[in-house]
Image (tube, rainbow, N blue to C red):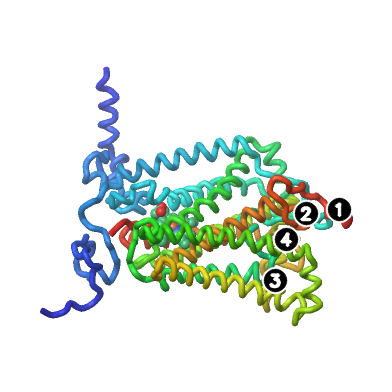
Amino acid sequence: MLEIPAQIWQKTKTSYIWRSLFRHGYPDSRKNQSLAVFTNVFLHLHPVKVRRHALAIPYTWCMGGLSFFLFLILTLTGTLLMFYYHPSVDGVYNAYGDIKDLETVVVFGQLLRNMHRWAAHGMVITVFLHMIRVFYTGSYKPPREFNWVIGTLLFFFTILLSYTGYLLPWDQLAFWAVTVGYEIARATPFIGDEFSFVVFGGFQLGPNALLRFYVLHVVGLPLATGFLIAIHFWRIRKDGGITGPL
Amino acid sequence: MTTPRGPQPFAGQEKRLRLLAFVRQDSVVRVDKRVEDTAMVWPHLLVIEFIAAMLWSIGLFVIAAAFNAPLQDHATPDCTPNPSKAPWYLLNLQELLLHMDKGLAGVVVPTVWLTFMAAIPYIDRSREGVGIYFTSANGKRITIFAAVFATVGTFSLILLDAFLKAHGYIEFATEHFPGGKQLLPNYLIPIGVMIGLSVLLVLIVQRLYAANTREWMIAVYTGFVAVYLVLTVVGTSMRGPGMDLFPPWAVPSTHQCLEPNI
Ligand code: HEM
């Protein structure tokens, strides 16, 4: 009797389809562990081996990894939110009404919104902590100078992502919080009016600003951030993995 | 013996993994990984990543189930809440706005800071202390000193500003300062204070702790982090209506619509 599942498993593993998916055995030997990492598109972000030191949680606090993880969660929950959201200020389908619907009508809508919101706050915190750990461990030093520069940009983009998202519910909180930023943009030396006109689509916060922030929030900034993250990770590999005592 | 040409491996790391047989490794990658002292990614790293991801998923789920994201009334341009605040991670800038020209605080200072931050590795180039928290015992002392210096300094400046404003500083400046309340109070004094205190910090740590480049960089960066945190805390929990300063436990609630007489 008991050999039936074992036989099925054996059959599956040697079947044509299975072997088209996986080109190595179960990763319980060094060879298969290596193959598992570098034949898998997701795992191949990693090298096959890392310095033992790199595994120490007190060293990295996992903050870079968790920033990335939150970025993925935000992409996922954000995409789901997009199914319910219209970036317009009035009309039958409008932003504020959509958020209300998420809270009252959509099944698990409130949970979805909460997750997106808190993950966004969390990402600002994790990125900041990550930057702090990278600084204090001196991990920006050669050969990692340029990756630190990429990191600075990532910090900036993370804040921009959070800020553009803040406007989208179009409630009092959103409107006036973003107004503070608008006033700042207008006070930019020399090009204040032009700059704020381009970013906010007018001389006051209205439908154009909402649309611009929406497009930036769901397309422009995530793409740019994803692109930078890809370079960031690539550079970590090319710079010999993460730092440790020499 | 001839001296070898091209970039040389860092001292002590001549023994390296060679990935490409025909390209000098230094010309493509700069690896400082030694062959020994490694762990397999599968399973050792992946296990950590998996557990971290699971714990955070659960944590986020619990938080999202317990706390609802805020949603207020529909946006109304005619109804200004007092105070109107930016999201907390920008309240540091909003706090800065209260003490100087808007464009200076909101645009110039962050731009200069981000540029400076990106430039850090090009100023501090030694490889001393890579991978060691605070580099050395001296670095640790400098971190603590700079944190205290910046925290106390920032709080004092905020209090001083509140005190002066309460005693007619703005009116006085408008009448008696060259350029009125714009030139000196809004531009020159804040710029002077920001640059002056940073330079002072560097000079002090060079004097007291004989700081080298890495170490004074630690001082400046720590100072930034401390100022950033202090401004965020003050902006978030000590500013009430009119953006006046209150102790954190006595901040009046926000007036939902600005009315001239409250
Ligand atoms: C979206 C934001 C970011 C993500 C997802 C991210 C992700 C990561 C990850 C996964 C690592 C591997 C080591 C670790 O976890 O600590 C790393 C390393 C690194 N990060 Fe980031 N990072 C981000 C932002 C930043 C920022 C803001 C900076 C600095 C300004 C930065 C600079 C670096 C540097 C220099 C390394 C190499 C560290 C070493 O070799 O020890 N990153 N990053």
In the figure, residue A144 lies in which quadrant?
bottom left
Along the horizontal axis of the image, is B63 left or right of A12?
right
Q: Is mark 3 within 8 Å of ligand 1?
A: no
Closer to us: A191 or A62: A62
Residue on which disc 3 sits: B101
Residues at badges 2 and 4 in contact (C-beta under 8 Å)? no
Q: Which numbered marker is on residue A179? A: 4
Residue type for callout 1: Ile
In the figure, residue A103 lies in which quadrant?
top right
Find the residue positioned furthest to the top: A1
* Image: B250 above or below B117: above
Tell me how far mark 1 sits from mark 4, CA to CA: 22 Å
Q: Which numbered marker is on residue B241? A: 2
First along the sequence among labels 2 and 3: 3
| Rendered residue at 31%/43% (across/down) | B44
Residue type for callout 3: Asp
Q: Secondary structure at mark 2?
A: helix
Can the viewer see residue A228?
no
Subunit of mark 1? B
| Rendered residue at 74%/46% (across/down) | B72
Residues at badges 2 and 1 in contact (C-beta under 8 Å)? yes
Rendered location of residue A66, percent (x, y): 46, 48
Q: Secondary structure at mark 3?
A: loop
Tell me how far mark 2 sits from mark 1, CA to CA: 9 Å
Find the residue positioned furthest to the right: B261
Question: Are discs 4 and 3 both within one chain?
Answer: no
